[in-house]
């Protein structure tokens, strides 16, 4: 018996010569790559949230904490870009992190428009636990995969992401 995930015997080809993996007449949203990825992300996020609960960090808060800890951003503007958040959302999120004593904003002495960020000692302690939690949760979700399968999966996902970024750049040019 064929799995629902098995591609059709003959895949249609678009006018530009690329395969069309989905057909509107037989579309099953529950079997789409987007839906499956969303379900996996949701499961990972829920497990990470459960593991972070004792630290008081939410899913929205651990990402900027980790980016600050890893040195991926040092200003409010950089962190907002890295987290793909607008300025207002980032301000509210930083208000909550500051209220918890995990980070602080420091206005630049050279340029008053720039607000630098730093983790407090408590923030560094909380952030240094995040990679271990992420590793544990992701390893649990990859149980049963071989190293080769894991590497192949990552290569497919990178390729799909590159295509998505190309499509987004094309759309932005229009």
Image: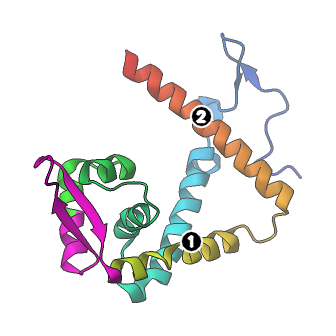
In the drawing, what numbered circle is on residue 20?
none
- For marks 2 and 1, the one nearer the N-term is 1
Residue drawn 65% across and 32% down? 22
SS under mark 2 = helix
Residue that lies at the very extreme toward the right in this rendered image: 1
User: Mark 1 packing: few (<14 Cα in 10 Å), some, or many (20+)?
Assistant: some
101 to the left or right of 134 = left
Quarter of the image where one finds residue 21: top right
Q: Quadrant of the C terminus?
A: top left
Q: Is residue 156 above or below residue 144?
A: above
Residue drawn 66% across and 10% down? 15
In the drawing, what numbered circle is on residue 134?
1
Residue that lies at the very extreme toward the top in this rendered image: 15
Whether residue 161 is visible to the viewer of this picture, yes or no, is yes
The magenta span reads: 93-121
Q: Is residue 49 above or below residue 173?
A: below
Whole-percent x and y of residue 95?
A: 18, 68
40 to the left or right of 75 = right
Residue 110 lies in magenta, yes or no? yes
Residue that lies at the very extreme toward the bottom in this rendered image: 54
Residue that lies at the very extreme toward the left in this rendered image: 112
Q: To which residue does mark 2 refer?
A: 162
Whether residue 4 is visible to the viewer of this picture, yes or no, is no
Residue 95 lies in magenta, yes or no? yes
- The front one of 88 and 69 is 69
């Amino acid at each position: 018996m064929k799995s629902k995930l098995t591609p059709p015997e003959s895949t249609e080809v678009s006018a530009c010569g690329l395969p069309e993996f989905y057909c509107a007449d037989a579309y099953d949203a529950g079997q789409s790559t987007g839906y499956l990825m969303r379900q996996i992300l949701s499961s990972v996020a829920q497990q990470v949230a459960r593991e972070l609960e004792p630290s008081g960090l939410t899913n929205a808060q651990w990402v900027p904490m980790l980016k600050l800890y890893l040195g991926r951003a040092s200003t409010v503007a950089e962190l907002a870009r890295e987290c793909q958040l607008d300025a207002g959302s980032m301000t509210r999120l930083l208000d909550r992190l500051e209220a918890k004593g995990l980070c602080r904003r420091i206005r630049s002495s050279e340029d008053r428009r720039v607000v630098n960020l730093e983790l407090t000692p408590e923030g560094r302690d909380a952030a240094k636990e995040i990679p271990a939690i992420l590793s544990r949760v992701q390893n649990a979700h990859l149980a049963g995969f071989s190293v080769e399968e894991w590497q192949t999966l990552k290569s497919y996902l990178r390729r799909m992401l590159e295509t998505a970024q190309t499509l987004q750049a094309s759309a932005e040019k229009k």
